[in-house]
Amino acid sequence: MTGHATEVARGERFEFGANWTRFLNVLNDDRIHQVEKSLREMLGVSDLKDKRFLDIGSGVNAH
């Protein structure tokens, strides 16, 4: 078993895409609006137009 497979088996790492599948099951318009509001407040801007974001995940299961 590879290091990655061992970590998946122990619940320390996700299978590729499994976290996205679970996330999409709870994603809705209300949650999107909440995140947009939070980002505007954090960045101190009135809108997110022309803003770009890069989400870099490690794949580590953060319980």
Image (cartoon, helix red, strand yellow):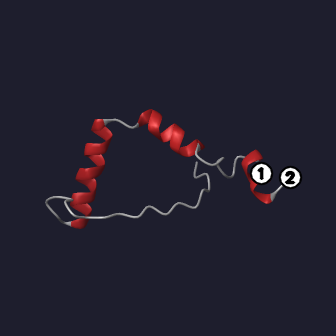
Residue 33 x/y as whole percent: 25, 44
Please report the residue visible at 26 percent of the width from the left and 51 percent of the height from the top.
Answer: 36
**SS of the residue at dot 2?**
loop
Identify which residue, 62 or 22, lies in the foreground.
Answer: 22
Q: Which amino acid does label 2 sit on?
A: Met
Residue 1 x/y as whole percent: 86, 52
Q: Which mark is residue 1?
A: 2
Is 44 situated left or right of 58 in this image? left
Q: Mark 1 points at which residue?
A: 5
Q: How far apart are marks 1 and 2 (CA)?
A: 6 Å
Identify which residue, 57 or 41, lies in the foreground.
Answer: 57
User: How many marks do you count on the picture?
Assistant: 2
Is 9 situated left or right of 37 in this image? right
With respect to residue 53, does 27 lie above or below?
A: above
10 Å crowding of disc 1: few (<14), some (14-19), many (20+)? some
Q: Do the residues labelled 1 and 2 touch (CB within 8 Å)?
A: yes
**SS of the residue at dot 1?**
helix
Q: In which quarter of the image is residue 53?
A: bottom left
With respect to residue 26, does 58 lie above or below?
A: below
Residue 61 x/y as whole percent: 61, 51
Q: Which residue lies furthest to the left in this view?
A: 46
Identify which residue, 62 or 18, lies in the foreground.
Answer: 18
Please report the residue visible at 30 percent of the width from the left and 49 percent of the height from the top.
Answer: 35
With respect to residue 36, does 52 lie above or below?
A: below
Please report the residue visible at 19 percent of the width from the left and 60 percent of the height from the top.
Answer: 49
Residue 28 x/y as whole percent: 34, 35
Q: Which residue lies furthest to the front in this view?
A: 50
Q: Which amino acid does label 1 sit on?
A: Ala
Is 44 situated left or right of 29 in this image? left
10 Å crowding of disc 2: few (<14), some (14-19), many (20+)? few
